Amino acid sequence: MSDARASFAAAGEHAEIALVVVTYNNADHVAGLLESLRAEAVQVGIRLIVTDNASADDTVALLSTEPNVIVVQTGGNLGYAGGVNAASAHLGAADAVLVLNPDLAVEPGCLRAMLDRLEISGAGVVVPRLVGTDGATSLSLRREPTIVNSLGDALFGAHLAARPAALSETVLSPGSYESAHPVEWSTGAAVLTRRDIADAIGDWDERFFLYSEEVDYLRRARERGASIWFEPSARMRHDEGGSGASVRLKSLMAVNRVRYVRKYHSAGYAAAFHATVILHAVMRSYSAAHRQIMKTLLDQRSWRDLPRATRTSR
């Protein structure tokens, strides 16, 4: 195709990528994302499915004017995992499934580079380089959460970047973002999964309304023998300012870290990990937000009041 802005694959057509975007009041971002995806569709066959979690702004109205965009309205706010799962019936015939945040813009050649990495490496999952609006590489790569690296992050936070790798869940070394290599997991802004692996993993775990759903998904990929690769030549710009979090959401992030560890570890291990997450908030309790997070972590009865899936209509 020679058109600088190509069409997306229709529902019945084969696509190289079934691309899923979950929206919630993202009218300010979807136009830019769609523009970048149409440019990519010149070289890559894309079927685009957008699941909307009951946006109150113009997100759905904007999407309705776009040809060959499959819009699924969930009838409520099902969260990120629930939104991804709502798209599963619409994936159709596709070689891979790509889940994207709505506040991204895909740079030229990104999707082809990710598909090439899938083929060259035999990976089950590929994640791209995320850059901020200033072009700086985001520290998006992660290690599996442990008591030790959670304790290191509680004590040092973003300081002492040269500390031993075991003392940080975030991969801090700049060199790790300059070459393609296997990783344990990455932030879930962009995750490309080979279709057979996606089918084997199944649904994203909706117990994680928001946050920790990607570490759970990628752990399950590894448990099925799939490797996860980082591809630095595949670049996506992430407007993280468009993903601002309230104190309640930051509390949910902390709580879901504990829930994730409880899912996979013994009660004793999970209790020790919980203590390190509390310590993280205590060390920063000069901030009102962190005092609230600490209070929430200490009062497990309050966890039921954190943001969770709601449905307003069928």
Image: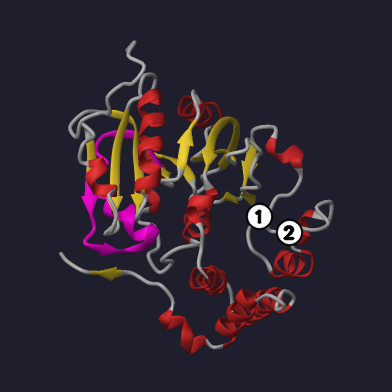
- Compared with 248, 216 (above or below) is above
Residue in view at x 28 percent, y 28 percent: 8
Rendered residue at 37%/65% (across/down): 206
For residue 91, what is the image quadrant? top left
Above-or-below relation of 68 to 1: below
Is residue 90 at all visible to an observer of this figure?
A: no
State the image coordinates of residue 164 (x, y, percent, origin top left): 82, 55
> Label for residue 20?
none
Instruction: Name the secondary structure under disc 2.
Output: loop
Q: Residue at x 48, y 43 (%)?
A: 190
On screen, residue 175 versus residue 97, left or right, reads: right
User: Percent x, y for residue 84?
Assistant: 34, 53
Distance between the alpha carbons at the discs numbered 2 and 1 = 8 Å
Which region of the structure is painted magenta? Answer: 71-98
Q: Amino acid at mark 2?
A: Ser
Dot 2, crowdedness within 10 Å: few (<14), some or many (≥20)? Answer: many
Residue type at mark 1 is Arg
The quadrant of the rendering that contains the C terminus is bottom left
Q: Is residue 83 magenta?
A: yes
Q: Nearer the viewer, residue 33 or 144?
A: 33
Query: Residue placed at 44% from the left, 41% from the top?
Result: 193
Where residue 306 appears, x then y in whole percent? 44, 77
- Label 2 sits on residue: 168
Q: Is residue 94 magenta?
A: yes
Q: Position of residue 287 (x, y in %)?
A: 67, 75
Badge 2 vs badge 1, beta-carbon distance below 8 Å:
yes
